[in-house]
Image (cartoon, grey):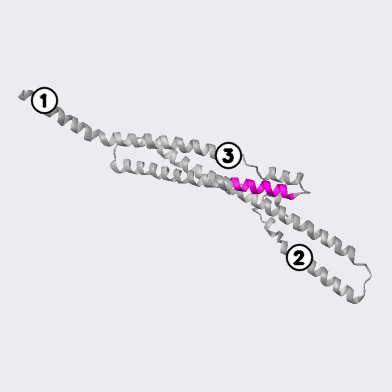
Amino acid sequence: ISSALTHVDNSESVLLQFWILHESRLNRCLALRRFEQRFKEIQSSFTQLYNDIIQLPDLNTSLHLFECCRTDNSNTREEIDQTLIQVDDLSERAQTMISHATLLANEGLGLIMEQQKQKSMAYGIDSIEPKCQELNEMKKKLTEQVDEKRNNLQLLRTYIDKLELINDWCTRGKDMLAMHPIHLSNDKAIRSLSELEHFLGDLSTINLDELQHSLTPEPLRVRF
């Protein structure tokens, strides 16, 4: 019996030493598996969200709609406004995904630092590092795509509004010229000149400079 008890004690001591030696390794392995599982989930969400964003009407599609409905800009405005609402909704989803991706990337860096600090056998560092880089790329691509969609649609909305203002301005100018005969008395000529100067000043209030910026997409850029 004494020999058996001694054997049990020795076995317990060996098992305890084994557990102390391997517990941290098992925990790191488990943390790596959880990291990889969360990465796959975020990667899948990113793919779906990114596809949803790029499938929204782009600038050329919206511009084509505008050209087809030039006589009634309200349809184009409504289309743009609806798309902007969709962009805002997708932007909120993107921000949520970006937050999750940031947390996971930080978690991955934490796993790497922990293993480097303990100077123990590396578990999946060669797998964690590229995944952290990919998470950062996902965040960048989502942000750029959402910003580009929103910016282009807002510029197109501005383009349509300003084009309508310019058309109205040109119509007013045409009517103004038709109303004034060629030969006028001095008083009428002075009054007509004043009206013309006021009319020309109205053009500056339309502020076409917004559509001349180098960052404005080529189809919407105004040149003089």
Q: Nearer the viewer, mark 3 or mark 1?
A: 3
Q: Is residue 99 visible?
A: yes
Q: Tag 1, which secondary structure?
A: helix
Disc 3: which residue: 52
Q: Position of residue 124 (x, y in %)?
A: 37, 35
List x then y, in percent, for residue 45.
50, 38
Q: Is residue 75 magenta?
A: yes
Instruction: Label 3, secondary structure: give it.
Output: helix
Three-letter residue code for mark 1: His
Determine the CA span between mark 2 and mark 1. Answer: 101 Å
Dot 3 surroundings within 10 Å: few (below 14), some, or many (20 or more)? few
Residue 106 is left or right of residue 187, and the answer is left
Mark 1 burial class by Cα count in 10 Å: few <14, some 14-19, many 20+: few
Question: Can you identify the residue that label 2 sits on?
Answer: 202
Whichever of labels 2 and 1 marks the residue nearer the N terminus, that label is: 1
Q: Quadrant of the C terminus?
A: bottom right
First in sequence, mark 3 or 1: give its number: 1
Question: Type of residue at label 3?
Answer: Asp
- In the image, which residues are magenta? 73-86
Q: Position of residue 217 (x, y in %)?
A: 67, 50
**Residue beneath label 1, please?**
7
Tag 2 and tag 3, C-beta contact below 8 Å: no
Identify the element where label 2 is drawn.
helix
Q: Residue at x 36, y 36 (%)?
A: 32
- The foreground one among 56 and 75 is 75
- Answer above or below: position of 15 versus 67: above
Q: CA distance from mark 2 to mark 3?
A: 42 Å
